[in-house]
Image: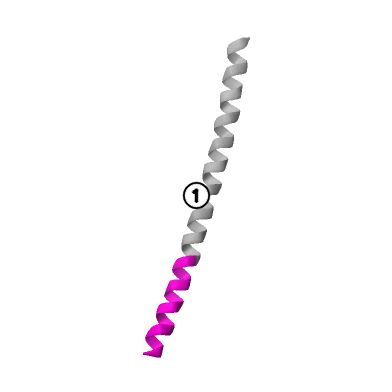
Amino acid sequence: MTAFLGSFIEYLGKAVIYAVLAFAGVKAGMKLRDSKDSKTSAVRINNGKK
């Protein structure tokens, strides 16, 4: 029984770590995409005024 619990806790720990890494990757990707979108929209606005 203790081997099962130890294995389960190890698996649960890995799952939590992978979830945190995935969440951080999604947040970083969203931030980078928002930054790129704001730069390209600023360029389009400036090009439209010329």
Q: Is residue 28 above or below residue 14?
A: above
Image location of residue 11, percent across then percent down: 42, 74
For the point 57% across and 19% down, which residue is it?
44
The span shown in magenta is 1-16
User: From the viewer's perspective, is 2 left or right of 36?
Assistant: left
Image location of residue 3, percent across then percent down: 40, 88
For the point 57% across and 27% down, which residue is it?
40
- Asked whether residue 14 is drawn in magenta, I would say yes
Give the colouring mode of the picture: one colour
Image location of residue 12, percent across then percent down: 43, 72
Main secondary structure type of the part rendered in magenta: helix
Q: Quadrant of the C terminus?
A: top right
How crowded is the residue under tag 1: few (<14 C-alpha within 10 Å), some, or many (20+)? few
For the point 43% across and 84% down, which residue is it?
6
For the point 59% across and 36% down, which residue is it?
35
Q: Is residue 45 above or below residue 15?
A: above
Q: Is residue 31 above or below residue 2?
A: above
- Asked whether residue 49 is drawn in magenta, I would say no
Name the residue beneath numbered marker 1.
Answer: 26
Numbered-mark total: 1
- What amino acid is at disc 1? Val
Which residue is situated farthest in the top direction here?
Answer: 50
Determine the secondary structure under disc 1. Answer: helix
User: From the viewer's perspective, is 36 left or right of 16?
Assistant: right
Q: Quadrant of the N terminus?
A: bottom left
